[in-house]
Amino acid sequence: MEVFVSTQISSFLEQRINHPSKFGFRQGKSACCGAGPFRGVFSCGGRRLVKQFELCENPNEYVFWDAIHLTEQAYKQLADQMWGGGVGHPHVLGPYNLMNLFQT
């Protein structure tokens, strides 16, 4: 018997990008660390081709840490959703969550 868990990360992110305050964030479109519009230039730490970067004061208020990575708070929400939530919402998670999978 095959059992699987499928997570639609794009739906998870779309919700937080478009409605950040609903999920406890202040900023959904701009990254905490980076350069350029939305701090979307992958330059955090100044170790890449672009040396300039801006850094926010509170990363937990942001969905994205930099142009690629989520913040610790966003990853925690994703892990919580994968572990115990989302069943019955096939656009986000299904047909099982991880807790259901490990209990069967």
Image (cartoon, rainbow, N blue to C red):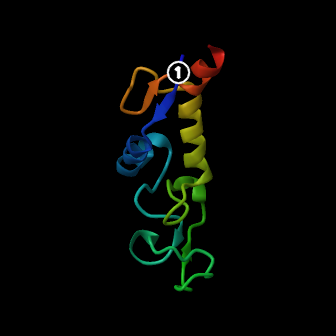
Q: Position of residue 61 (x, y in %)?
A: 54, 54
Q: Residue at x 44, y 43 (%)?
A: 9
Q: Residue furthest top?
A: 104
Q: Residues within 10 Å of mark 1 (few under 14, many from 20)?
A: few
Q: Residue at x 56, y 67 (%)?
A: 56
Q: Position of residue 52 (x, y in %)?
A: 54, 84
Count of labels in the image: 1
Is the N terminus in the top left, top right, bottom left or bottom right quadrant?
top right
Q: Residue furthest front?
A: 1
Q: Position of residue 95 (x, y in %)?
A: 45, 22
Relative height, residue 59 to residue 46 (above, below): above
Is the C terminus in the top left, top right, bottom left or bottom right quadrant?
top right
Q: Amino acid at mark 1?
A: Glu
Circle 1 sits on which residue? Answer: 2
Q: Position of residue 18 (x, y in %)?
A: 35, 49
Relative height, residue 93 to residue 29 (above, below): above
Q: Nearer the viewer, residue 66 or 100?
A: 100
